[in-house]
Amino acid sequence: MSDLVLSPTLTQKSVAIRNSLAGLGSVIELRPETRALVENGLRVQTLLDAIAPDLEIAEVLTIDSPDMLAEAETLNGRISALCADSGAIESERKALNAPFVDLGRAINGGYNELREHVSGVRERLSSKILAYHREQQRLAREREAQERAERERRAAEVAEEERKAKAAAQATLAAAQAAADAGKADEASALATQASVTIDTARQVTQQATLELAAPIFAAPAAKAKGVREVWKAELASHENLILHIAERIKAGDMSLMHLIPYDEAAGNRKAASEKRGFNVPGLRATCDSALSVRKTAIAA
């Protein structure tokens, strides 16, 4: 039976590690478990020697009876007491790292205080820039709305003027007809010409107003802050309405919105965990994986 031996690198550097820790002790306060390592040296080889027989037995152990199962569980508990994430070996590693972590935190703490102050100033300034940007965008939209409303008002006025012009032209045409009936040909011709001019003029004005209404709006552009990126998002207003809409699209052969109703994996996992072997959902399949929880067993000194 051969003992486990630390890697040469760790063994060779153990003295340097102790000296480094001792040096750090003059800069920051070492934790008690780290101080013990400085004074007594690394215990990892001793810890490995304690479980070396257990490791060799565990490699060749065959579990074929309740007694052997109990033996395997005992071995597992002793090995875990040293080698698990919270075991003695891991505790020693953390104790070695602790002063470096503490020193890093002390350094980061000093820098973070400065960064937080500067970041606060920058964030407040950025908020002012964004507020101005948004206000300018709002004013631009307001100017566009005012221009659009003015065009609509003008178009409505012109339409009313055209209606009145057509009514006046009809009255003039009636007068022209009366003059013609009275044998006043010249007067009738003049009145008919006047009515035609009135209608043509009103129609031209209406056409111009219609063109203006449809023309692009060139209001004063909004001032834009550099680096501002607009982010658009879609909020779910009604899940039911969304599903019904997508179903209608699918019925019509359009599958483009399928990605908007993804399978909720977390909800499926909860349902499978609740129903276990009774889980039965078409399109889904329940799977089961196993994990072992080990109770650590103290090793006799």
Image (spheres, rainbow, N blue to C red):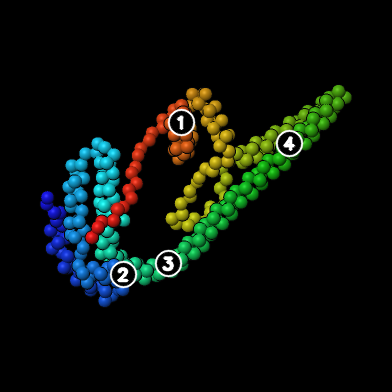
Tell whether label 4 touches label 3 (CB within 8 Å): no
Tell whether label 1 touches label 3 (CB within 8 Å): no
In the displayed image of the protein, which residue is found farthest to the bottom?
26
Q: Where does the image place residue 282, in percent across and percent down from the top left?
A: 46, 26
User: Residue 224, relative to residue 237: is it above or below?
Assistant: below
Residue 67 vs residue 235, the one in the foreground: 67
Pointer 4 or 2: first along the chain: 2
Pointer 4 or 1: first along the chain: 4
Residue 288 placement: quadrant: top left
Q: Please state which amino acid type lies under the numbered disc 1.
A: Phe
Give the CA distance from mark 4 to mark 2.
Answer: 94 Å
- Give the left or right position of residue 177, taking residue 112 as reference: right
Q: Where does the image place residue 244, in percent across and percent down from the top left?
A: 56, 30
Q: Please state which amino acid type lies under the numbered disc 3.
A: Glu
Mark 2 packing: few (<14 Cα in 10 Å), some, or many (20+)? Answer: some
Residue 233 vs residue 80, the one in the foreground: 80
Pointer 2 or 1: first along the chain: 2
Residue drawn 43% across and 31% down? 277
Q: Please name the residue that numbered disc 2 is placed on.
A: 31
Mark 4 packing: few (<14 Cα in 10 Å), some, or many (20+)? Answer: many
Pointer 3 or 2: first along the chain: 2
Q: Please state which amino acid type lies under the numbered disc 2.
A: Arg
> Which of the numbered marks, if any, corresponds to residue 162?
4
Q: Please name the residue that numbered disc 3 is placed on.
A: 116
Tell whether label 2 touches label 3 (CB within 8 Å): no
**Local SS, label 4:** helix
In the displayed image of the protein, which residue is found farthest to the front?
67
Give the CA distance from mark 3 to mark 2.
Answer: 29 Å
Q: Where does the image place residue 190, in percent across and percent down from the top left?
A: 78, 31
Give the CA distance from mark 2 to mark 1.
Answer: 52 Å
Q: Please name the residue that numbered disc 1 is placed on.
A: 279
